Structures are given as structure tokens and as C-alpha cells.
Image (spheres, rainbow, N blue to C red):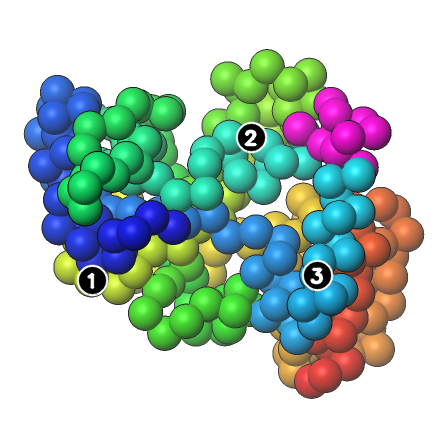
Amino acid sequence: MGKLTDEQVNQQAATIASSVLNDSVVAATRCHQVTTDNFMKGAGVGGGSRMAAKFGKKMGEAMMPSVGNMAKGLETGGLPKSFILAVTKDQVAAVEEKEKKGQLVEGEVIKSWPREGFRASMGVAAMNAVTAMDDDHQLITLYLPLDDSKNRYLKASANIQAAAGVSGQPTNFMICKDESAQAVAEELVGNTPAMPNIQIGGVPASGMGMPGQAAGGGDSTAQLEKLAQLHASGALTDAEFEAQKAKIIGA
């Protein structure tokens, strides 16, 4: 995060984005990435274990860069840790967040998508808790196309999604709850929050069940069995498996 607060950025975001895009921006807000570390923290995994998971992840990326880039692309959508999400009449754009002397200044357009067909969904209180989010922020999921990626694994994923009729990779971000952020949410989602398609290790979290909630009508034992199957198949990393297991057992 920069020196400016989310609220300070959001006060200037629409004006700056309009100038960068050379188009009238109807809503704009600062977005932050929601990472695997957020999910682990929300599940109660300690700082030491999370640090070890980060180190193992970096080592894996160094040893197998193509696979590492694929995993990073799926988690981040190719976007930085924070950026300005701007909405116009015809497009949705990610604009570089750039500050100078305590003011937001013009940055570059990172990515843009046609507004028609662009999908987003808002989180609910349970999802915010899972991501260790504070009360001043909320979860927004953007369904980002992978077809512009240069990574061959991401291209393959895009082809699989297209064949399955899936429009975009669900990618999780957090925004604050001020008027500017709410305007973006209303433009992209509407007034009715919906459970986002949270993915952990590429697997929808909704399919795993939440703590204290039956998965497919079963109990915590059934949830653990399903979790073990996902881990054995390689869909979940060791760190993600332990985080979800701790969450279920803790319930």
C-alpha cells in the first residue's frame, strides 16, 4: 500500500482515471490483491508457517518458472498488489496507482476489458472472515480473461475455460466501503451481494464447505475427506491443505 489511505486515493481516483483513459469514468476505487497468505491467516495459520509457505512458493517458482508464473497469473490475474479499478460506460480498466507528493497522479493503463459481458461478484461476511479482512474492507471477485497471457499454461487454462463455457478466472481483491468503492460495486455487480467463486489452488472454496457448515449435506468428517482428495490430486498445495484442515477442525 502507498502512503495515501484508500479513502484519500478514492477521492481522486475517478478524476485521474478519466484523464488516463481519456474517457468519462462513472466509478473508480483502489483495489488490493487477496492472496493465499490472506486465506491462511484467516484460517488461523501462524506467521512462521505462513513465512515458510511463502519461502517454499518462491523456491518452487525459481525451480519451475513457467509453472510458477501460471500459479501467480491465476492468483493475481496479472495485476499488481494494488491498482485503480475504473469503470466507464464501455470498459472496465485497471490503472496504475501512482503517487507523488501526497497526491495521486496519472499512471499507465495496465489492462482493460469491454464492459459488456464483464463479470464481478461481492463477498459476504463469512468470506471476509476467511480472508482475514478488517471491517473497513470488503471482498470483490473479478472474472478476468486469461486469453491475453503469454504463459503457455495460462493459455491452456483459457482454452479449457472457453471449451467449458466459463467466462474468466475468478480473481479476488479487496476494496474499502466508502462511497467510491460502493459505486464501483453497484456498477459491476448491482445492489445484491452474491457469494463469489472463491478459489484456493484453483478449486472453488464453496465446494470444500465452510467451517461449521456441512459440505454436500455431510459433517466435518466428509469435509476433511473431500479436502484430502483435493490435496492428493494436487489441486491444493500442502500449505493450502493445512490451512483448510485447521479451519474445519477448529469449527
Residue 28 place in picture, x, y as percent: 21, 43
Is disc 3 placed on a helix, strand or loop? helix
Residue with the mark numbered 2: 165
Distance from disc 1 to disc 2, alpha carbons, whole Å, reads: 35 Å
Please rate how many residues cluster around mark 2, counting C-alpha atoms within 10 Å: few if below 14, some from 14 to 19, many from 20: few
Please name the predominant secondary structure of the magenta segment in the image: helix
Above/below status of 159 relative to 207: above
What's the residue type where badge 2 is placed? Answer: Gly
Is disc 2 placed on a helix, strand or loop? loop
Say left or right for 18 vs 6. Answer: left
> For this rendering, which residue is in front, 203 or 63?
63
Looking at the image, is mark 1 or mark 2 earlier in the sequence? Answer: 2
> For this rendering, which residue is in front, 88 or 66?
66
Image quarter for residue 154?
top right
Residue 171 place in picture, x, y as percent: 50, 43
Above/below status of 249 relative to 173: below
Name which residue lies at 25% across and 39% down. Answer: 99
Q: Is residue 68 magenta?
A: yes
Residue with the mark numbered 1: 178
Evaluate whether residue 151 shows in this view.
yes
Q: Quadrant of the C terminus?
A: bottom right
For the residues labelled 3 and 1, say whether their Cβ atoms are less than 8 Å apart: no
Please rate how many residues cluster around mark 3, counting C-alpha atoms within 10 Å: few if below 14, some from 14 to 19, many from 20: some
Distance from disc 3 to disc 2, alpha carbons, whole Å, reads: 35 Å
Name which residue lies at 53% across and 64% down. Answer: 131
What's the residue type where badge 1 is placed? Answer: Asp
What's the residue type where badge 3 is placed? Answer: Arg
Say left or right for 168 vs 101. Answer: right
Is disc 1 placed on a helix, strand or loop? loop
Residue with the mark numbered 3: 50
